[in-house]
Image: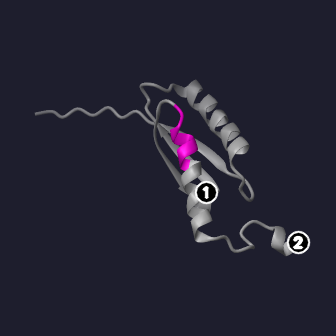
Amino acid sequence: AVSGARPGARLEDYEEYVKRLTNLEEIAKSFEGVVAAFAFQAGREIRVAVDPGKIDDSSATLLAKKIKEKIEKELTYPGQIKVTVIRELRATETAK
């Protein structure tokens, strides 16, 4: 019983696995300012890229918390899911 209770010990249907990853990404994409969301490590981590013009540093922290809370409410998952919000601003100029 102890061995079977650990995350990843039991076989999961492929369709259920893909559905869980898709749902995880869709939850993150449902928030305003989110550009892209990617699930990694078999759904144990999600990285969320945001528009730096719409989301500032303090809002990024708040967004990560909101995504975490929505995941806890709407999904069932083994173990834990790490939510990482990435906000990056790049400025590029070309000299001619």
Residue 7: x percent and y percent? 75, 65
Q: Residue at x 63, y 29 (%)?
A: 62
Q: Looking at numbered disc 2 in the image, what kind of residue is underneath it?
A: Val
Q: Looking at numbered disc 1 in the image, what kind of residue is underneath it?
A: Arg
Is residue 80 rendered magenta in the image?
no
Q: Is 72 or 49 nearer to us in this picture?
A: 72
Q: Residue at x 58, y 50 (%)?
A: 23
Q: Within 10 angstroms of label 1, few (less than 14), some, or many (20 or more) residues?
A: some
Give the quarter of the figure containing the C terminus.
Answer: top left
Q: Quickly name the residue at label 2.
A: 2
- In the rendering, which numbered label is found on residue 20? 1
Label 2 or label 1, whichever lies nearer to me, is 1
Image check: 25 left or right of 89? Answer: right
Distance of label 2 from label 1 (alpha carbons): 24 Å
For the record, the magenta segment spans 25-31
Q: Quadrant of residue 70?
A: top right
- Which element type, helix, strand or loop, lies under badge 1? helix
Is residue 27 rendered magenta in the image?
yes
